[in-house]
Each structure stands twice: as structure tokens, then as C-alpha cells.
Image: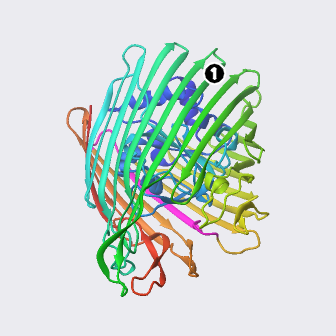
Amino acid sequence: MEPWKLASLAAMPWLTAAALAAQTPAEEEPALVEEIIVQAERVEETIPLDLRQFGNRVEVITAEELQRGGFNDVAQGLQMTVPGLYLAPKNGAFDYVGCSLQGSRCQDILWLIDGVRINNRLYNSTSPLDTVPAHMVERIEVLYGGQGIFYGTQSVAGVVNIVTKSFSDSQGGRVGLGVDGNDGLHANVDYRASPGGHRFVLYASSDEADGIQPYKDEDIQPSTTDRDRSYDVTTLGLKYAYEVSERARLSLQYQHTDAELDFARAYLNYDTFNARDEDILTLKYDLQATDNVGLFVKAYSHTWDTSYTRIYNVLDDNGAVTGNRRTVNDASYWGYDDYGLTAMTRIETGGGFDFAAGYEHQRFSGSDDVLLIADQTESVNAFFGQIRTNEEALARTRMAVGLRHNSPSGDGKVTVGNFSLHHDFTDSVYLRGSAGTSFRLPDAWQLYGNDPCCTMGNPDLEGEKSRNVNVAIGARRGSGLRWEVIGFQRAVDDLIGVVDGMRVNTDRTVDFGGWELNLAYEFTPDWTASFNYVATSAEAEGGSEQITDVPESTLKASLSYRAASSPVELVLTLLNVGDLYDSVSGGIGRVEHGGYTVLDLGGACRFGNGDRHRIGIRLENALDEEYASSLGRSFRDVDGSSYPYANLGTPRTFHVAYTFRL
């Protein structure tokens, strides 16, 4: 590994203990190091590394950590491992999630797969993680704080970039098979090769299960006959890259997802599900024009098509099931098309200041036949740039300042800026921080919703604007204790609300603030522990209550063992969620449903020639904690009266998985 890459890894201000250990994989898997090197040479892939050097907080979750934790879908992996991120799958694996990053709203987080946004273009608040398996992941990069300069709309609280299996200089791969106690079956494979100047990556996974009972017995009406929330998700990915020259690469990647996902209901439900087809296609050209100038041009297409089917049981006048059924939605369509083009250059002058600049175009359209949305096309053009200091300017301090101007096809032009700084007091103690503005553009429902049942859209809406500050002081050492204390503040203005049945920009502001403590301790090179605690305050202007779906506190802790000299792996992860509120319609109002603790236990044994075989186990929710991920409103069969119900998290579940390394 080149010295500058080793230096950049060592300069990471904060990572969990497991993530730090993962930067030097065990000797039997040297290909993982090479894959990171190949990616790190490209301008787009180094954006998180660059931002980290200039004071932005970045966490990295590796494929090894996800495998060690026994996770089948990305959402559950993020739920248990990422500091400062609250995430609650609605009814277990492969479902919608509630989320908050350092006290944010869920719609203030930008989600990417290989740099392509996957946030739902129809509804900003609909989370996009219900079809993302963990087996396709190389690493997950989490950037905290406003990241509007490089990432654009919706990166108000941060960015989560899911990087799929990467190119490698060597040939290899894995085959895996797993089962779980919810009648789940999980199969996956990946393979990489690089003959001549050609590179290939293939990955595929299939995850299916009858699933869990999503509600308490007393919350399910007799009219619901489908009482398990099942899923069936198949993902296929293919990547190809051609080394045009020593300095240029042309790459193409395609990912297809086919899924059928139950949408559970506590009353009347005979069968309700979303049938999903999703395709992401990306073409990219990378060029290192000179030793100091690099650039890339990327075009992408993301299509998301879902058919919604809802079939109810029919009741008689006394509220008893008749045996007849009523089709409410027969494969009703909702979906969107999202296209984009990005060009960016990075210039290293060696004279004290470096530069990055780029252009981005996005165009999307979508429609919904369930909650009616007019089929309209929206486009956005953006120019962005950043000036950075280097070691020639200041020996112990790195600073960066940047601007981005966004021009949507409708109203709402917006310019945002950001300043960040990283300063080393000593070789181990540092200060970092960032301050700036970000934005969130309206979604298609807010712009073009035209269903008479509901709030009407407004094509003249402007985007929400935010101001943010994120500051930390900490210490890093090669071994022993690492710590960091963080303070954050965020204010969101021009909130999109409702007046007289139409979406409008209101003059309300929501203030978010809090603090975070990170600790990591290396008892020995084999035993590591981490601790993360976040306390948040999220209040609307003029109010004193925590806004809904944002926990007042979260705590995450882990203890792991992995040694090159031993075939045994062990991991313990703990999550505690503090007070958390939901608002239930129908006059029920504000209800608290937090205050729960989830403990996962995992282990594995490697064996065979070169430890190529691995059997892993996971005891999910080992304490069998019954907890509510969110609340909803249901109706009684007998009299039609309403009552609140809890969406339950996964109960105690045993997982076992076998992996063979090719």
C-alpha cells in the first residue's frame, strides 16, 4: 500500500473499534485490502476520505463487520452498528424503517448505492432500505452533518453510501447459505476477476422468509387471516471495468432487484403486498489526467416500479368473516424514473491550496395510482466547488470552504455553503468541525399530488433550508483508549406544511441539537470494545415536546473477538433506545413507545485449508425484548372503533450461515 494511503487511513479521527480493526484484514483475506486500494484511486470514491481530512465525520462499516454480526439485510446491520444512527425496521428484516441521524428526521438523510441516490422520489419520508441485502456490500460509508456541497438535496443530516462488491486485482469470491428461525432462507454468491485490462464483479443474493407476526395477539382483529409478514428479495449485480490506459478507466455496472414484500395490516387483511422491480445502471469514465488533476464523468439511470395489491376479507353486519374477499387494489402502479449526469474534477496544486469542482444534472418523473400523483417531470441543475488547504499552507490544520448552486425546473433556486476544519493539537489529540447550510427539495407527492382524498400538491413549492454545526474534540492512539465528544446543532426553515388543504412553505422552524460520546478500547489486538451514546433535542418552534420519530437518546455498545491465530470469532452488540414518541391519527394523539433494549450475540468458526470455510451463528434479540418500532391505527371488526397498535420488532431469532471462500 502506498504511504499516502496508509497515512489517510491512520488520520481517521474516529471509527468504531471494529471498523478500525477492519482496515487491516486477517492474513487469509488479502484481496479485501486490494479492493479498497482500487476504489480509493478514483475521484468519486475518495470524496468521503477527502471530506474526513477537512473536519467532516466519517464512519465506515465493512463487509467483515456485517458478516461477523450475522446480518442478512443492511437495515438491521445499520441499526446495531452505526454510532449516532437510530434505525428501526417496521416489522423485521426487509421492511420500511424509521430513522434519525444525530436527532434528525428520517427524510433528512440521503441514501446512496455506489453514489446513486435511492431515496424515494415520490415520498421523501419513505425509506429505501427494504430491498437492500447485506451480502452485496463491500463497505458502508456514513457521513455526518450537512453534506449539500457534493451530495445535494436531502443530505441535511448526513449521507449513507452503500458500496457494493468492489473490483479486485486478484481472482476470488464467496458462496453462502443461511437459515433462520422465522422460516428464512438466505443464499448469496460473489465473484471477482481481472484478466488483462478487464475487471469483473458478479454478486447475487436471495432472501426469503415467512417472517414474524408483526403485532401483539390482542392487537390483531379476527378479520386478519394473513398474520405473518413475509418477504422474498432477489438481487443481481454485475460490474465491468476496462483499463483504457494506466490513467483511464471506463466502467459499467448494473443492479437488478426483484422483490415481493408483505405490507402487514392488523385488520381485514387477506393479502397485501408490494411487487417490486428496480434497476440501477451506471456508466462512468475516470481519468487521472496528470499527477495533480483527476476527473470523472458519470451517467446513471434508476427505475423503481412497484405494483400494489390489497385484498380484504369481507365481514357481515355483526363483524364476522364471511369467507368472501374484496380486492381494493389489483396491482396498482406506483413508481418513478430517475436519471442523472455528474462531472467532477479535483486539482492538487502543491502550492498551499487544492480545488474540487463539478456539475450535476438530475431529472426524475413518477406517478402513483393509489394516492394519486400526476405524472410530471422535474429536473435540477447544480454547480459546486470547494477550495482546500494542504500541508504546504498549514502543517497541523486542514480547512475547506465550498458552495453549491441548485436550479430546479420550478421555483426554489438555492445556494448553500459549508466550511470545515481539522486541527491536530498533538499527534493524538484533535479538533474537528463543520458549519454550513443544506437543503431538501420537495418530492413528487408534495409537488404534484392530486388525489381528492388528501392534501393537494403545489408545483410552486420551494425546498426546505437548514443551518448546521457539528464540532468534536477527541484523541486517537494506535492501541488502548480512543475517545471523542461531539456537539451538534441544526435548524430547518421553510418547512413544507399544509394550509387550506394545499402544501405550502410555512414560516415554522424546527431546532435539532444534542451531544454524542464515542469510546473505543483495545484490550488486546484480538479483543476490542466500543460505546456510543447520543442525547438529542428536536423541537418545533413554539413547542417544548420532542417531535415524533426522534428518540431522546440512543446507546450502542459492542464487544468483539477475532484473532488470526484462532479460528473462533465472537461478537456482542447492544442497543438501547430512550423515550420515543409517535402521533396516532383518529384523535388518539401522542403516544410513547421507546425505552427498550436489544441484545445480539454472534459467533463463528473458520476451518479447512486457509480457513476457507466459515460457520456463523447469531442469536438476534437474545433477551426476547418485545418492543415497538412504531405505532399505527387499526379498527375493530365489531363496531369499527379505532385503537392504537404497535409494530413489533423481531423477537428472539436464531440464525446460522455457512460461507465458502473461493
Q: Position of residue 138 (x, y in %)?
A: 43, 38
Q: Is residue 602 visible?
A: yes
Image point (65%, 45%), residue name = 429
Which residue appears farthest toward the left when viewing the image?
A: 608
Residue 91, how many percent across, how many down? 41, 64
Q: How many marks?
A: 1
Which quarter of the image is occupied by the C terminus? top left
Say if 141 sits above or below 81 in the image: above
Q: Is residue 594 magenta?
A: no
Residue at image coords 57%, 66%: 549
Q: Is residue 557 left or right of residue 42?
A: left
Q: Amino acid at mark 1?
A: Gly
Which secondary structure, mark 1? strand
Mark 1 crowd level (few <14, some 14–19, many ≥20, 10 Å Cα): many
The region drawn magenta spans 547-567
Q: Is residue 552 magenta?
A: yes
x and y, in percent, of residue 645 in the image: 45, 76
Q: Residue at x 52, y 19 (%)?
A: 249
